[in-house]
Image (spheres, helix red, strand yellow):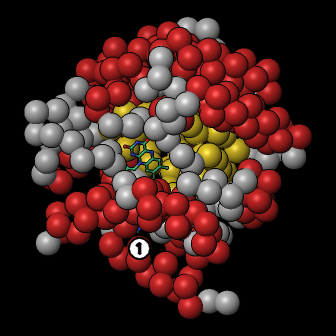
């Protein structure tokens, strides 16, 4: 049943017609609940609200799989503008991005050029940029680009997914770059040839990766809403004498608010992933696939004026 509803929402997330309708009519339903609005400007008050509550933010301009080079250039300009606004408005925020929004599916030259423009600005302004990880067919290229660019730029980080068999080795391979790594379980539907299918196996690998990255002394972002994983990371760090400034917890905007607040009260660093943009529909469906109970947010939103 769980797998059925997961597949159903993942199927809906790719429906172009629904996507178009939602971006035209549905933003009111999700603004301030799971996204910050359609533009970076609109997201600013929500970033400030999180900062006031003691939480950092990472923003993400929604919309991946761009197949037109001009759109990737617009995206790049938009991200550079967001980095500048973060600095100007003195926001405690990073930027997350997806390589398929910057031309990964068009040409490697294009995505490299766009990334270099963004990272030059990021280093100049001192704002961290995280390259999100997409599906496994793009993992190798994403990690290769990350490693190439990390050699030239300070303010770049990436993501490792616990459901992939390869991830432990990937983490080892990157350690000499002293990477800031976000660890996640993984959000895409992957084949058994590349990924663990059972939750308990994904969870076991997630714990292993948390321990490995914390032990490395390199900065670790533990991005999960799973209290058992949060608790594991807290206990592991305590046991090994790893300071609270060596790692942070990350959660999606609108999810597990109480847990976020408790962690802040306990002195842990918490970063909220706040998406914006008119392409919010696919993002919302993927969240429903992870946890159909999130539909409560949507229904509440629809009945509000
Ligand atoms: C900040 C952030 C960035 C991410 N970046 C990426 C990325 O770059 N690439 C990628 O593939 N994936 C990314 N993800 C998604 C991630 O891979 C998982 O799909 C997602 O976080 C669900 O897994 P989980 O660890 O939260 O818990 P799960 O294993 O899905 O669930 C465990 C338990 O956690 C609780 N829980 C889980 N989700 C929710 C929720 N939405 N609301 C309330 N409770 C919940 C429930 O109690 C549930 O039983 C990101 C996630 C976060 C939080």
Q: Is residue 209 above or below residue 50?
A: above
Name the residue: 35% across, 76% down: 293
Quarter the C terminus occupies: bottom right
Task: Give residue 161's position: percent from left, percent from top.
Answer: 33, 38
Task: Give residue 38's position: percent from left, percent from top.
Answer: 68, 58
Q: Is mark 1 within 8 Å of ligand 1?
A: yes
Name the residue: 66% across, 50% down: 56
Q: Nearer the viewer, residue 62 or 15?
A: 15
Q: Viewed as shown, does residue 216 lie left or right of 73? A: left
Which residue in the protein does label 1 denote?
Answer: 294
Packing grade of label 1 (10 A; few <14, some 14-19, many >=20) is some
Q: Nearer the viewer, residue 198 or 117?
A: 117
Q: Viewed as shown, does residue 229 lie left or right of 281? A: left
Q: Viewed as shown, does residue 130 lie left or right of 288? A: right
Q: Viewed as shown, does residue 72 lie left or right of 251? A: right
Q: Nearer the viewer, residue 280 or 25?
A: 25
- Can the viewer see residue 177? no
Give the structural element (helix, strand or loop) at label 1. helix
Name the residue: 52% across, 72% down: 258
Task: Give residue 101's position: percent from left, percent from top.
Answer: 54, 35
Residue furthest toward the right?
88
Ligand 1 in which quarter: bottom left
- Can the viewer see residue 183? yes
Quadrant position of residue 45 = bottom right
Quarter the N terminus occupies: bottom left
Name the residue: 49% across, 41% down: 64
Task: Give residue 70's position: percent from left, percent from top.
Answer: 64, 28
């Amino acid at each position: 049943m769980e797998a059925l509803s997961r597949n159903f929402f993942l199927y809906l997330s790719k429906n172009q017609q629904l996507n178009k309708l939602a971006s035209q009519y549905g933003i009111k339903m999700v603004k301030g609940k799971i996204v910050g609005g359609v533009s970076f400007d609109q997201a600013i008050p929500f970033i400030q609200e999180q900062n006031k509550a003691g939480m950092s933010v990472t923003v993400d301009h929604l919309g991946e799989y761009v197949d037109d080079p001009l759109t990737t250039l617009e995206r790049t300009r938009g991200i550079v503008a967001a980095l500048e606004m973060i600095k100007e408005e003195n926001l405690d925020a990073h930027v997350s991005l997806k390589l398929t929004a910057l031309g990964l599916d068009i040409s490697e030259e294009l995505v490299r050029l766009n990334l270099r423009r963004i990272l030059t600005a990021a280093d100049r302004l001192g704002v961290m940029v995280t390259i999100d990880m997409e599906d496994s067919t793009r993992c190798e290229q994403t990690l290769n680009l990350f490693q190439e660019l990390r050699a030239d730029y300070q303010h770049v980080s990436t993501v490792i997914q616990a459901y992939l068999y390869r991830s432990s080795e990937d983490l080892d391979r990157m350690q000499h770059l002293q990477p800031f790594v976000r660890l996640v379980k993984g959000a895409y539907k992957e084949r058994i040839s590349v990924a663990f299918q059972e939750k308990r196996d994904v969870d076991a690998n997630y714990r292993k990766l948390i321990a490995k990255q914390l032990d490395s002394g390199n900065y670790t972002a533990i991005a999960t809403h799973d209290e058992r994983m949060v608790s594991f990371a807290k206990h592991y760090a305590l046991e090994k004498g790893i300071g609270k400034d060596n790692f942070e917890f990350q959660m999606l905007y609108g999810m597990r608010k109480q847990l976020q607040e408790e962690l802040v009260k306990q002195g842990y660093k918490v970063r909220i992933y706040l998406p914006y943009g008119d392409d919010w529909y696919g993002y919302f469906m993927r969240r429903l696939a992870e946890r159909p109970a999130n539909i409560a947010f949507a229904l509440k939103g629809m009945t509000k004026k």
